[in-house]
Amino acid sequence: METGLPADPPEPRVVGAAVARRELPVETAALARWLIGKGLVHDGPGGLTAGRIVETEAYLVGDAASHAFKGPSGRNGSMFLERGHAYVYFIYGTWFCMNVSSEAKGAGAAVLLRALDPVAGIELMARRRGKSETRDLTRGPGRLAQAMAIDLQQDGADLCGDGALRLVHVDGPLAEIGESKRIGITKEADRVLRFYERGSTFISGTKKLNV
DNA sequence: TATGAGATTGGCT
DNA sequence: GCCAATCTCATAG
C-alpha cells in the first residue's frame, strides 16, 4: 500500500476548505451518504488530527433507534440543533461517539460517524489511543472519538465554522459508496441506513459489512 | 430510590 | 464467542 508515493509528500491530502452549511444535504440519510469521503479536522490538545470519513449511519426523525425519538433530554439536546453541529454522547461508561446533527433546528436527527481513514496527526492519534496499529486508531465510533480527542467539550460545536473541530473537503476521486443495515442496534434493525466507502480497510465490524 | 438497557471495545476462553 | 467496564436516561415502585 502507498509504496508508489514520493517519500515526502509536500501537503497532506486534506484541502482544508471548510464545508459551508448550505452545502449539507437537508435530509438525514442523504447527509450520511454525502459525508463519505469528506474530512474531519480537530485542532485539539497536543496538535492537529484529521481523517477522511469512510463510514456513517443515519438516525432519522421518528426513528425508534434514535436517541432523539422520545424528545429532547439533557443528553441529546445537540441533535435538535440546525444541521452541521456536533452531537457527542458518552456510552457504556467508557466511550464517546460523535454525530453530525442534520435537518432543521428542532427536528432531532443526526449522522453517527463510525470510521475514519487517518490523514494527519497519526502519531498523535496513536498516543491518545495507546495503540500503534494504524488500522485500529479510527475503526469504530468509540476509537474514532478517542483518536480525535472528541469528548463532551465538543458537544454542540458548529462544524461549519472556523472552530477547532470542523468538516472540510478532501482531494481525490469520489468514493464508491456501499449501503447496509445499521450496526449494534435492536430497534429498527432492518433499515438500510449505514453508508461506507467500498474497500476501505478502516470499516468497522466484520468483512461481510464491507462488500 | 432502584434497576435495566444501550448507536462499544478489549481481553480472555 | 462471551463478558466486564461503568455513565445516562427511562421506567417502575
Image (cartoon, coloured by chain):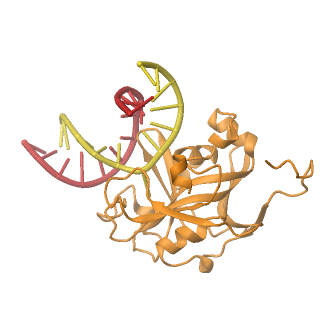
Chain colours: A orange, B yellow, C red
Q: Residue at x 56, y 57 (%)?
A: A211
In x, y percent, where is residue A165? 64, 58
Q: Residue at x 58, y 51 (%)?
A: A203
In x, y percent, where is residue A150? 58, 49
Q: Classify C10 as above or below A81.
A: above
In x, y percent, where is residue A132? 70, 34
Q: Nearer the viewer, residue B8 or A101?
A: B8
As drawn, is B3 to the left or to the right of A210? left
Q: Nearer the viewer, residue A195 or A83?
A: A195
**Residue A146 is drawn in which quadrant?**
top right
Note whether residue A82 is visible.
no
Q: How many marks?
A: 0
**Residue A78 is drawn in which quadrant?**
bottom left
**Residue A38 is drawn in which quadrant?**
bottom right
Note whether residue A62 is visible.
yes
